[in-house]
Image (cartoon, helix red, strand yellow):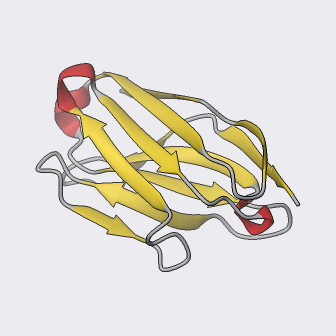
Amino acid sequence: QVQLVESGGGLVQAGGSLTLSCVASGSIFSINVMAWYRQAPGKQREFVAAITSGITTNYADSVKGRFTIARDNAKNTVYLRMNSLKPEDTAVYYCNAPVVGAPFNYWGQGTQVTVSS
């Protein structure tokens, strides 16, 4: 089992910044990629960004150039630095970790990000 605990969400004005953190604990040997997803009210959960243990990154087009995903393997922590936030970035942000070699994902409980206009 892997536990993912997010923190860092909050209320920010448009144009502002926030940094989310996600700490993984438990059987962390079973995961490689760590990612962030988000779900806005009335919408499906969508991919935001991902990073491998080798620090290869991938971003959704909607956040490229504004968000940065980073990882501290020694601390089992993944970060999402969000700059130039827009009201449409408002969502619950979830940390995600697919299990290596298995069709299963671990999810955190989510952290709310609200961007006011």
Q: Is residue 51 above or below residue 28?
A: below
Residue at image point 31% right, 45% down: 70
The quarter of the image holding the C terminus is bottom right
State which quadrant residue 65 falls in.
bottom left
State which quadrant residue 77 falls in.
top left
Kindly tell me whether residue 103 is visible in this rendering. no
Q: Is residue 108 above or below residue 97?
A: above
Residue at image point 48% right, 52% down: 36
- Coordinates of residue 87 in the picture (x, y in percent): 80, 63
Q: Is residue 7 left or right of residue 29?
A: right
Spot the residue most to the bottom: 61
Residue at image point 52% right, 69% down: 63
Q: Is residue 110 above or below residue 16?
A: above
- Coordinates of residue 8 in the picture (x, y in percent): 61, 30
- 89 or 111, which lies in front? 89
Spot the residue most to the front: 15
